[in-house]
């Protein structure tokens, strides 16, 4: 299935100069939604993933289904101020603006094997922040899965030694 053809480019959103990769058009197609989840599940089925750490908010869309398929727990990384219990926080730069994400302190056990999941890798700041949160809790990053990677932003470089763990379905 040609997943790329189902992603809509929205120019100048959320600000001038940014081409927003809109996945809602992909999500509208049941077979495409299944294909994304199935392809990730196939890739990670034998990797002993204990937890899918999904990034708010579009990572959540695929994260629940993937955690179910992998028989793993679902752990949300959320924007600052959304998680109710005690958290760890990391601030970082975005393609547009800055952000802070957090993770519940008791969301992961030391030694657990984690798959980080988001819809899109742009500058890599969000994924790098998620890696930092996971490792600060003593868990191991076993993979970083994204539906879309914007190669021209070289986000992989920000992931340093974790760059090889990135698995992308669609490159631009
Ligand atoms: P970054 O931290 O720069 O890798 O940005 C990744 C996060 O921002 C992801 O959670 C994406 O959903 C969102 N994002 C950044 N750039 C875009 C874009 N051009 N289109 C859609 N989402 C984007």
Image (cartoon, rainbow, N blue to C red):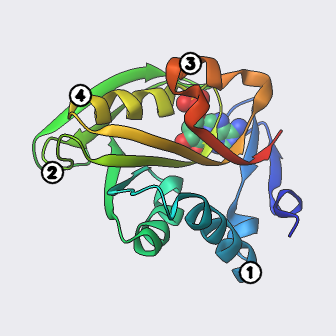
Q: Are marks 4 and 2 in contact (CB under 8 Å)?
A: no
CA distance for labels 3 and 1? 33 Å
Mark 2 nearby-residue class (10 Å; few <14, some 14–19, many ≥20)? few
Q: Earlier in the sequence, mark 3 or mark 1?
A: 1
SS at circle 3: helix
Mark 4 nearby-residue class (10 Å; few <14, some 14–19, many ≥20)? few
Mark whose residue sits in front, 4 or 2: 4
Left or right for 135, reference 94: left
Q: In this rendering, is residue 162 above or below 79?
A: above
Left or right for 163, reference 23: left
User: Which residue corresponds to the image point at 46% horizontal and 27% vertical from the top-left?
Assistant: 128
Q: In this rendering, is residue 96 above or below 9?
A: above
Mark whose residue sits in front, 3 or 2: 3
Q: Which residue is mark 2?
A: 84
Q: Earlier in the sequence, mark 3 or mark 2?
A: 2
Mark 1 nearby-residue class (10 Å; few <14, some 14–19, many ≥20)? few
Q: Earlier in the sequence, mark 4 or mark 1?
A: 1
Q: Which residue is mark 1?
A: 31
Give ligand 1's quarter of the image. Answer: top right
Left or right for 146, reference 106: right
Numbered badge on residue 136: 4
Q: Which residue is mark 3?
A: 158
Q: Quadrant of the N terminus?
A: bottom right
Q: In this rendering, is residue 15 above or below 143?
A: above
CA distance for labels 3 and 2? 29 Å
SS at circle 1: helix
């Amino acid at each position: 299935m040609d997943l790329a053809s189902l992603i809509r480019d929205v120019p100048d959103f959320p600000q001038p100069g940014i081409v927003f990769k809109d996945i809602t058009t992909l999500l509208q197609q049941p077979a495409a939604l299944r294909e994304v989840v199935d392809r990730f599940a196939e890739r990670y089925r034998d990797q002993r993933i204990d937890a899918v750490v999904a990034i708010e908010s579009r990572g959540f869309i695929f994260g629940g289904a993937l955690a179910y398929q992998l028989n793993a727990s679902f752990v949300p990384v959320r924007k600052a101020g959304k998680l109710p219990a005690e958290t760890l926080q990391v601030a970082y730069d975005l393609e547009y603006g800055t952000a802070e994400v957090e993770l519940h302190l008791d969301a992961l056990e030391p030694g657990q094997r984690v798959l980080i999941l988001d819809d899109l890798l742009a500058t890599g700041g969000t994924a790098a922040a998620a890696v930092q949160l996971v490792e600060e809790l003593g868990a191991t990053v076993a993979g970083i899965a994204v539906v879309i990677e914007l190669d021209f932003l070289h986000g992989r470089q920000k992931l340093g030694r974790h760059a090889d763990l990135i698995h992308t379905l669609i490159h631009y």
